[in-house]
Amino acid sequence: MPATTAAALKTVIGLEVHAQVLTKSKMYCSCSADYANAEPNTHVCMVCLGLPGALPVMNEVAIETVIRTGLALNCEIPSYCKMDRKNYVYPDLPKGYQISQYDLPLAVNGTLEIVVDGVSRQAGITRVHIEEDTGRLVHDMAAHDDMSLVDLNRSGVPLMEIVGEPDLTTPEEAREYLMALRRILRAIGASTGNMEEGAFRCDANISVRTEDGSYIGPKVEIKNMNSFRAVERALRFEEIRQREAVSNGEELVQETRGWVDASGITVSQRSKEQAHDYRYFPEPDLPPLNIPREMVDEIAKSVGELPITRERRFVSDFGLSPADAALLNSERPIADYYEAVLNGKTQGTYPQVVANWLVNDVMGLARAKGLRADEMPITSQQLRGLVDMVEGKKLTGGAAKSVLLGMEENESPAVAAERLNLLAMDDDGAVKDAAMAAIEANPAAVEDFRGGKQAAIGRLIGDVMKRTGGRAKPDDVRAALLELLNGN
Ligand SMILES: [Zn+2]
């Protein structure tokens, strides 16, 4: 192999994602798919235990969900597909095969829009197919140091595989691809997308080649990446390893490598098995599926507005900053909540004011309380009421934050503000008294202000706010202070 300079090489990355499909029951039996919250081997039956003679029955919701995913990824949905057996032996696979799809998947030829550094591009989606998850091996060395245990609760949980085209050229793009994909899956209710819990897993293929094709490196598959960050780090490590090998004239081989997160390296696991090792053949226990056009049209209605489209609408129609629009669209329930707060009031600065409260205060409070994205500490009506009171100068910003924290369930912000004695002061006399006290207590600030340091008034305003428990309106305070300072 001719020594090639690392700079002349380009990186080619393709991702394969396995995402558990959100359904109540498993793919081919009626056992609960909620495998994690059960005693081991309690959500099992003849079918998912792989006992001889047991017959699988297709989960229609899972099929519909994969079609919805395909549509959200701009795929074609062929009118005909079939299931195939993928044969291999492993202790967590009781049947000795997985029912998957081989040459006729549910969805093909799609695209996924990714945005990196503000630049948008389409990455190709080769296919989306349905299959089933395996069981889990439990290596509990403390309790059983001479054996491994198997839990088959997960065996047969619906799993979809989303295969991307090798269109990605940097580890950053790979990370964006995964985040964009997961956001869509969550938005359409297809998967929890939870990577830590194993509901969203990624294998990556990476190789390097010269632009002109004079050198095309072998594909290396990377496994064992359990976070978006791990995917990006593993790909960066592998990209550098392959580039250095090529420029040193070393031979690269097609292989599977495992990511070791703690040491930040990939290590060789095995040379790549070929697809025909799995001896795919059509699943004899399940009929092929005809997917009528009307069914696809009906499912298409349930896709809804995709997150990236909605994010752009928040910028173009509501005038939100791109960063806030992205944050509000990280999860569909947050975007829904935001639009419920707006309640059609989309003029002027109101949408951005609401976004500020939601992003900075309400979501912060939700995080502090450990709430999920679909749970908010206050209702959309409560937040709207709170923002309207601030906008109407019935509450100062500081007092509104205290109302937010002190408001009880189903209590209106107005009632809460009154109960907590936080309503904005309308009493000019009280504001003036507080201003006089502040001037008395801060001679240095007064001197600075009179000496020409206009900013010194901020210290006095702060003191008045403290004295009035944050209830004085900042404009009133400033006016009262200026009157007193300039009058003397
Ligand atoms: Zn079962």
Image (cartoon, rainbow, N blue to C red):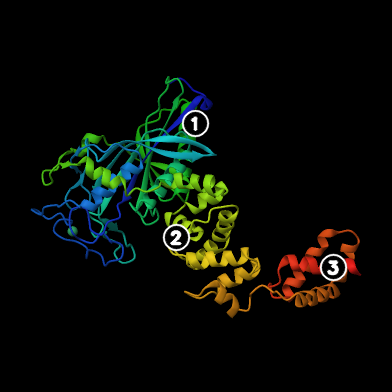
Which of the two marks, 1 or 2, is nearer to us in this view?
2
Residue 230 visible within the image: no
> Between disc 1 and disc 2, whose residue precedes?
1
Name the residue type under label 3. Answer: Glu
Q: Which residue position holds label 2?
A: 373
- Of helix, strand and loop, which one carries label 2? loop
Q: Is residue 379 above or below residue 310?
A: below
Task: Compute the Cα span from label 3 to label 2.
Answer: 48 Å
438 vs 329, left or right, is right
Which of the two marks, 3 or 2, is nearer to us in this view?
3
Q: x, y percentage for residue 88?
A: 20, 44
Q: Badges 3 and 2: C-beta atoms under 8 Å apart?
A: no
Q: Is residue 196 above or below residue 440?
A: above
Disc 2 packing (10 Å; few <14; some 14–19; many ≥20): some
Q: x, y percentage for residue 419?
A: 58, 80
Q: x, y percentage for residue 221?
A: 36, 38
Disc 3 packing (10 Å; few <14; some 14–19; many ≥20): few
Q: Which residue position holds label 1?
A: 244
Residue 91 has which mark? none
Question: In the current view of this chain or complex, which residue is farthest to the left?
Answer: 53
> Between disc 1 and disc 3, whose residue precedes?
1
Task: Residue at 28% x, 61% y: name it.
Answer: 34
Q: Which residue position holds label 3?
A: 483
Q: Quadrant of ligand 1?
A: bottom left
Name the residue type under label 1. Answer: Glu
Q: Which quarter of the picture shows residue 219? A: top left
Task: Compute the Cα span from label 1 to label 2.
Answer: 43 Å
Q: x, y percentage for residue 77?
A: 26, 38
